[in-house]
Image (cartoon, grey):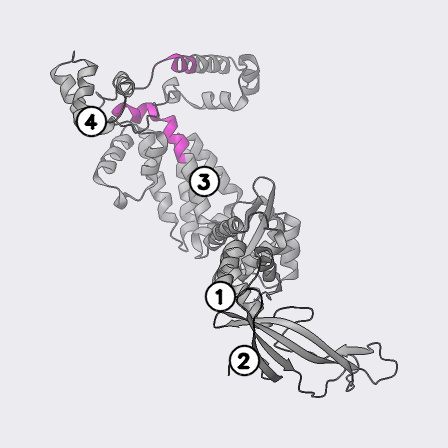
């Protein structure tokens, strides 16, 4: 059947109509005259008149299809019925006041759901549907949202409607990763109201948001809150970067020497002043006032036992000279007085494309004579956080040398690897985490102590994250796709429209 959507109607004629553009196929249809009852009193209505409508339908052979429909307007015979007249319903064909059939609206919505306005409008034009990008985007709101039951395990996370200004909340099924709902903000009261209106949730996966934790405690006091393992590992990574930077004077000896200059001298002098005041019994706040420093700066100086731990290794980035470092080292070993201009000529023959000034700085910084190229604290921390089996030979050697540089680095490496083993959820990980926290607090690693205090603050959710298989990765995936949706709908991503598209995706 060419037009299955007209099975309940009488087709009068089908003809081609030539007009502006490529023309269209016009289908004349009418109702079959079957009895229709009043929606209010269910009495069979009498014919009052006829109504003509024109609807756009799904294209055929790349041509537009126009449906010219005639249906009845009926009068209710019941005396006193509030509905005096009513129109004949068109089930499966069109909704009231629509200018497109349900089949065409569904097709347009499927295209726009994937491509949004501009791209969707261009593709629809190829398929034979003329529609502006604004109309294409608005057509999404006519698509019905899927009715999904409330799952027992949900994931909750926020995403930016306008970064640093407005945020919304997405709720998904943590098992199947289906989108359940999108809330207009990330306030605790909003999530609490949603949880009370949708009973049946037993577990909630979330990040470290205090607002979400408070909403869950108020609405579902017996529900299990599950922290996100990625965020826990990320918080540990931030603490490790700070600890590695604090001990750069130790592991940095294998690379370029620490840069001695005005900044290093100022750092040592401030450390001496802070510790001199502390030895006299002066408090941290009073030290900050006397020295004109920020309180957090004074705390940082007070935590370290020697000023060398505050002197940072220079953070050299890779340069164009690095590939020719071995050649420069050999030539300067053979002839220490070799001119820089001569070295420049030689490495240019080998393919060097940089400038003479870059070569001068490279040599003056001592990067030619050092045992190995410089590495930043952040890069070394990344090696420390990488699974040992995935490290290459060069990286493994560099990491082993840095770990063996001091006792604190050795302890830090062991703690990181022990904690990484806890990220594989197992029933006994809660007790193992307690042992790990006690071990970490016995080490001289202040930044790691701050991380353990954060674990204690949300300990129940952390224990659930390390013992249960559920996590919040699905909501992060939804947020990633939401960023793409916002880019596609730039300038028209109102919340109602954005919510509709997220839930239809």
| Nearer to the camera, 476 or 308 | 476
Q: Which residue is mark 4?
A: 324
Task: Decide whether residue 105 is among the magenta residues.
Answer: no
Classed neighbour count for the residue bearing mark 2: other residues with Cα under 10 Å, few (<14), some (14–19), many (≥20): few
Q: Residue 185: percent from the left, percent from the top? A: 62, 48
Point out the tag, 1 or 2, that comes first from the N-terminus: 2
- Say whether residue 181 is visible: no
Mark 1 or mark 3, which has the lower sequence index? Answer: 1
Mark 4 and mark 3 lie on one chain; the one further toward the N terminus is: 3
* Mark 1 or mark 3, whichever is nearer to me: 1
260 drawn magenta: yes
Pair 4/2: label in front:
2
Q: Circle 4: is it few (<14), some (14-19), or many (20+) Cα within 10 Å?
A: some
Task: Report whether 12 appears left or right of 228.
Answer: right
Residue for point 39% across, 49% down: 423
Real-space Cα distance between discs 4 and 3?
Answer: 38 Å
Q: Position of residue 414 (x, y in %)?
A: 32, 38
Q: Secondary structure at mark 4?
A: helix
Which of pointers 4 and 1 indicates the residue nearer the eye?
Answer: 1
User: Which label number is shown at residue 3?
Assistant: 2
Q: Which residue is mark 3?
A: 235
Residue stretch in magenta:
240-267
Q: Is residue 242 left or right of residue 159?
A: left
Above or below, 260 relative to 469: above
Secondary structure found at label 1 = helix
Alpha carbon distance from label 1 to label 2: 17 Å
Please name the residue shown 44% across and 30% down the image: 446
Query: Is the residue under label 2 in contact with that under label 1 (CB below 8 Å)?
Result: no
User: What main secondary structure does the magenta stretch of the protein show?
Assistant: helix
């Amino acid at each position: 059947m060419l037009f299955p959507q007209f099975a309940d109607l009488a087709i009068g004629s089908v003809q081609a109509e030539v007009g502006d553009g490529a023309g269209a196929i016009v289908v004349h249809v009418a109702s079959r005259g079957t009895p229709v009852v009043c929606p209010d009193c269910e009495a069979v209505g009498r014919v009052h008149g006829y109504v003509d409508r024109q609807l756009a339908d799904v294209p055929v052979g790349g041509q537009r299809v126009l449906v010219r429909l005639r249906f009845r307007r009926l009068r209710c015979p019941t005396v006193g019925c509030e509905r005096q007249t009513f129109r004949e319903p068109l089930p499966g064909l069109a909704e009231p006041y629509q200018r497109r059939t349900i089949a065409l609206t569904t097709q347009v919505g499927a295209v726009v759901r994937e491509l949004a306005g501009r791209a969707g409008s261009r593709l629809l034009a190829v398929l034979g549907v003329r529609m502006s990008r604004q109309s294409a985007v608005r057509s999404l709101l006519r698509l019905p949202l899927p009715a999904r039951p409330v799952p027992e395990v949900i994931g909750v996370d926020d995403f930016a409607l306008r970064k640093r200004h407005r945020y919304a909340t997405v709720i998904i099924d943590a098992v199947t990763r289906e989108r359940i709902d999108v809330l207009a903000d990330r306030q605790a009261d909003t999530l609490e109201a949603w949880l009370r209106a949708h009973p049946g949730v037993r577990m909630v996966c979330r990040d470290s948001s205090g607002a979400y934790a408070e909403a869950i405690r108020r609405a579902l006091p017996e529900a299990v809150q599950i922290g996100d393992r990625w965020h826990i590992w990320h918080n540990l990574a931030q603490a490790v970067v700070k600890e590695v930077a604090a001990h750069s004077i130790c592991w940095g000896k294998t690379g370029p020497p620490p840069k001695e200059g005005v900044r290093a001298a100022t750092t040592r002098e401030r450390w001496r002043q802070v510790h001199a005041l502390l030895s006299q019994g002066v408090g941290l706040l009073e030290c900050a006032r006397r020295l004109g420093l920020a309180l957090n700066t004074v705390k940082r100086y007070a935590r370290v036992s020697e000023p060398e731990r505050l002197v940072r290794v220079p953070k050299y980035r890779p340069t164009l000279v690095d590939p020719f470092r071995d050649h420069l080292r050999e030539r300067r070993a053979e002839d220490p007085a070799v001119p820089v201009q001569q070295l420049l000529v030689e490495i240019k023959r080998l393919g060097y494309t940089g400038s003479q000034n870059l070569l001068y700085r490279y040599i003056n910084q001592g990067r030619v004579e050092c045992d190995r190229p410089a590495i930043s604290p952040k890069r070394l921390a990344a090696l420390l956080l990488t699974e040992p089996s995935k490290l290459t030979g060069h990286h493994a050697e560099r990491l082993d040398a840095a770990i063996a540089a001091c006792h604190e680095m050795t302890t830090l490496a062991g703690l990181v690897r022990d904690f990484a083993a806890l990220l594989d959820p197992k029933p006994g990980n809660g007790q193992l985490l307690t042992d790990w926290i006690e071990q970490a607090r016995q080490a001289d690693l202040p930044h790691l102590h701050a991380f353990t205090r954060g674990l204690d603050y949300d300990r129940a959710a952390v224990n659930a994250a390390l013992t249960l298989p559920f996590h919040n990765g699905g909501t992060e995936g939804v947020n990633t796709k939401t960023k793409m949706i916002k880019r596609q709908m730039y300038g028209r991503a109102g919340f109602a429209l954005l919510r509709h598209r997220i839930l239809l995706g």
